Image (spheres, rainbow, N blue to C red):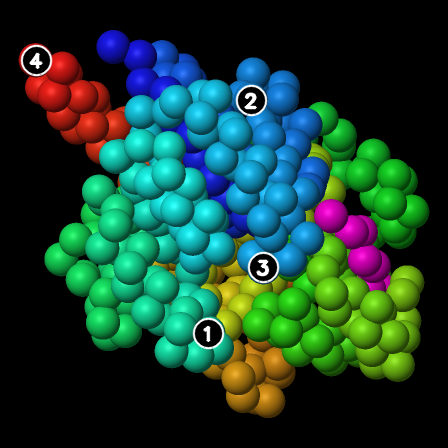
Amino acid sequence: MSRRILHITESLGRTGVATQVFVLSRGLVERGCDVHVAALGGSGALAAAFRAAGISTAELGRRWTADPVAYYKLHRLVRSLRPDIVHTWNYDAGVYGLATARWCGVQNVVTGLYRIDRWTGGERLIIARRLTMGAARLTTDSTYLRDWYAGQGLSGDRFTIIPPGVAPAPASDVSREGLLRELHLPTDARLIGVVGRLVPENRVKDLIWAADLLRVLYDNLRLLIIGDGPQRRQLEQYARLASDLDHIQFLGERGDVWRIMPHLDVLWNASENRSHSIAILEAMAAGVPVIASDTPLNRELVIDNETGYLIPPLERSGRATRARRTDRIFNDVDLARQLGSAARNRIVDCFDAEQCVERHSELCWEFSSNLRSGAK
């Protein structure tokens, strides 16, 4: 029995959630499911990847938090598709998806909460509780997130925890020398990558400061900031003051991070404790050492001193510690290889895409069994 599944997410940009939706959707299609994806916002860097994988997408063009036009478009889509399962990803998608599913008579709604939202008031918390009450299943990808939501009054016992998954890192279609030429970088450049949305909680400003500390030792250092967001202009101005835009380059949102990732010497992450970083997992899959902020969510991904390094996230001393750890990686080839190899093994053991898809597929089969029982 083929299952028709509609995933509802906030965007098709290169966010951790959109990347997970893509990995999961592609895997479910390979297992015979009829998968569709609706994005509340407009197009993004991953839209082409969805299309290339044969996954139907709809972009609702939401303009405001509560946009009646976007609600209407989603309602028409659900009425047309008649999905067996609606799976929403995080708060806004959950609000739109659950309301629409109820109107259209879809009983099987999976409400996914994969990020900590800073509640702006009691109203959002009340709505979040209603989302969990109205869903047939709750999912998250982290024990820490499950416990956090339980502390906010949501039912922790109803969550199914499915860890995130990434596919084995594809081989880059460009050599390191070719990439350096393409980006107009020196042939001996030391490459540090930062991948993610340019928003305050990712603390990219701290990373720019740390890079400037390290540049005293390595004039060939290049900090590649991959991503876009509301802070981009402010961060570019700060980079001009703290360093320069030769050593710190803003590459914008890109759909080809897989080409760049294997050539990085190290990946930096300084984000606060909001959600799992798919960029960290992708770096680990590519064998790239990771230096990340020491937060509960990052501790679920990185084993300190074994698969990478975890450092204090909010202390000024953390910038110097990040620079020292990076200096060790730059100067010890065997250490870099050891960290990268251990990281790859951890991905295979704990965060493999096939395992993630299989867990979600089992969840879908539970609904299919319910559908068949109901038909009888």
Residue designated by label 4: 376
Residue 155: x %, y % from top left: 18, 62
Note whether 318 is above or below 251 in the view shown.
below
Q: Is residue 350 left or right of residue 217?
A: left
Check residue 250 for magenta coloring: yes
The residue mark sitting in front, 4 or 1, is: 4
Disc 4 or 1, which lies upstream in sequence?
Answer: 1
Question: Splitting the image into 4 quarters, where does residue 216 fall?
Answer: bottom right
Q: Amino acid at mark 3?
A: Thr
Whether residue 352 is visible: no
Q: Amino acid at mark 2?
A: Ser
Residue under numbered circle 2 = 56
Mark 4 or mark 3, which has the lower sequence index?
A: 3
Would you say residue 6 is visible in this rendering? yes
**Residue drawn at 26 percent across, 34 percent down:** 108
Q: Which mark is residue 118?
A: 1
CA distance separating discs 4 and 3: 41 Å
Give the CA separation, mark 4 to mark 1: 45 Å
| Horizontal and vertical percent position of residue 230 | 74, 65
Please name the residue that numbered disc 3 is placed on.
65
Viewed as shown, does residue 9 lie left or right of 218? left
Q: Position of residue 291 (x, y in %)?
A: 53, 64
Residue at 62% x, 44% y: name it: 69
What segment is highlighted magenta in the picture? Answer: 247-253
| Above or below, comparing residue 115 to residue 363 in the picture | below
Q: Is residue 128 magenta?
A: no
> What's the CA distance linking mark 1 and mark 2?
32 Å
Q: Residue at the location (18% across, 61% down)?
A: 156
Label 2 secondary element: strand
